[in-house]
């Protein structure tokens, strides 16, 4: 997410520093520092101003920069640039409340050994402690979680702006996000989802003017399980739930994978309702689900066979 040198610049920079002044403070060559600053400018975490022959570097007004610099000022004895490299920021992103190693590993999709290594580093520096098997921040170090969240959100917004200036993020985690746009996006790692994606499973619906995309570097296509979750995040009304039920009735979806995806998106109850509705042929009472006879008619309209 951020290299050590980039974190060093953000730790040190004061409004109006020149590149040469920063190079002196950080004991790096100007050419090496210039590359790091260029990367930070691209990420909109700093910007540069020309002052005669000098180029001055100014922190952006990003909330992530503000939180990070406050941490550095308040805890100057901690080498945050060294601490926050590797997997640490990812672990901190999911550390929103007291959690066990297993919980952080599951949420971040990392090995327990990786989580243990990161937590040991944080514990050795007095940033976190344990109580009944759960890790929690000491003092005001919970701002580390805030920094990780704000930084990921900032970088997601910047990435989205490069492909859709008016895009809106509907859901996000550390390295993925679901976005709504008014324009078509044909850029690597942006996968179309929402109602338009149902066509890939022979279900054609009337589309709105909005388009929806999942940004992810870890998938090759949006699966039916992912698509159902995205659809409910976009709109959780009866109509959209009915579309998800049609999809679940027309394709084979692995239930354990489906429930795993639901946990990722915070939709455990909603997905459980869909599964039980189909299993009981509409016996489940939920005002956001269609009456069974209405759903049977809808399935017939779309030539979807329901189990008997």
Image (cartoon, rainbow, N blue to C red):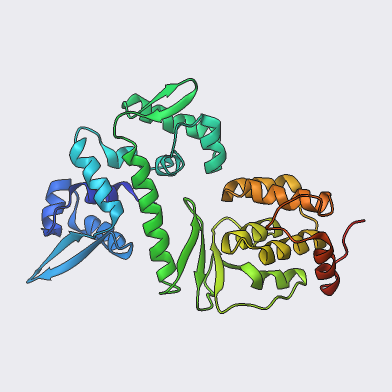
Residue 27 shows up from this direction = no
Q: Nearer the viewer, residue 307 or 163?
A: 307
Query: Is residue 5 left or right of 204 when viewed as pictured?
Result: left
Which residue is most to the right? 308
Counting from the top left corner in percent of width and height, residue 115 is at 49, 33
Query: Is residue 4 left or right of 300 when viewed as pictured?
Result: left
| Quarter containing the C terminus | bottom right
Counting from the top left corner in percent of width and height, residue 256 is at 72, 44
Residue 38 shows up from this direction = yes
Counting from the top left corner in percent of width and height, residue 274 is at 73, 53
Which residue is most to the top? 132
Using the rendered view, name the quadrant where residue 60 is placed: bottom left
The residue located at (30%, 39%) in the rendering is: 82
Q: Nearer the viewer, residue 198 or 19?
A: 198
Using the rendered view, name the quadrant where residue 199 is placed: bottom right
Query: Is residue 306 left or right of 6 when viewed as pictured?
Result: right
In this rendering, is residue 305 above or below 6? Answer: below
The residue located at (68%, 58%) in the rendering is: 288
The residue located at (81%, 63%) in the rendering is: 250
Using the rendered view, name the quadrant where residue 247 is placed: bottom right
Q: Nearer the viewer, residue 33 or 242?
A: 242
The residue located at (11%, 60%) in the rendering is: 16
Which residue is most to the left? 52
């Amino acid at each position: 997410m951020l290299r050590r040198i980039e974190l060093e610049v953000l730790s040190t920079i004061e409004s109006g520093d020149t590149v040469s002044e920063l190079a002196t403070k950080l004991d790096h060559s100007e050419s090496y520092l210039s590359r790091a600053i260029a990367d930070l400018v691209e990420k909109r975490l700093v910007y540069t101003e020309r002052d005669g022959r000098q180029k001055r570097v100014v922190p952006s007004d990003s909330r992530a920069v503000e939180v990070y610099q406050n941490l550095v000022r308040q805890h100057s004895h901690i080498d945050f640039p060294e601490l926050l490299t590797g997997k640490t920021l990812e672990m901190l992103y999911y550390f929103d409340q007291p959690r066990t190693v297993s919980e952080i590993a599951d949420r971040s999709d990392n090995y327990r050994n990786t989580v243990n290594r990161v937590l040991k580093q944080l514990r050795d520096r007095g940033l976190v402690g344990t109580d009944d098997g759960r890790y929690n921040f000491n003092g005001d170090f919970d701002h580390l979680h805030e920094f990780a969240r704000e930084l990921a959100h900032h970088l997601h917004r910047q990435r989205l702006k490069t492909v859709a200036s008016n895009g809106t993020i509907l859901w996000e985690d550390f390295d993925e996000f679901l976005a709504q746009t008014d324009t078509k996006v044909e850029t690597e790692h942006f996968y179309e989802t929402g109602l338009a994606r149902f066509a890939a499973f022979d279900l054609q619906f009337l589309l709105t003017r909005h388009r929806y995309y999942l940004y992810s570097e870890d998938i090759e296509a949006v699966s039916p399980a992912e698509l159902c979750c995205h659809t409910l995040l976009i709109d959780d009304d009866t109509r959209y739930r009915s579309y998800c039920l049609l999809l679940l009735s027309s394709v084979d979806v692995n239930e354990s994978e489906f429930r795993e995806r639901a946990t990722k998106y915070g939709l455990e109850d909603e997905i459980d309702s869909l599964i039980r509705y189909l299993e009981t042929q509409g016996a489940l009472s939920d005002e956001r689900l269609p009456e069974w006879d209405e759903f049977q008619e809808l399935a017939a309209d779309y030539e979807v066979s329901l189990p008997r």
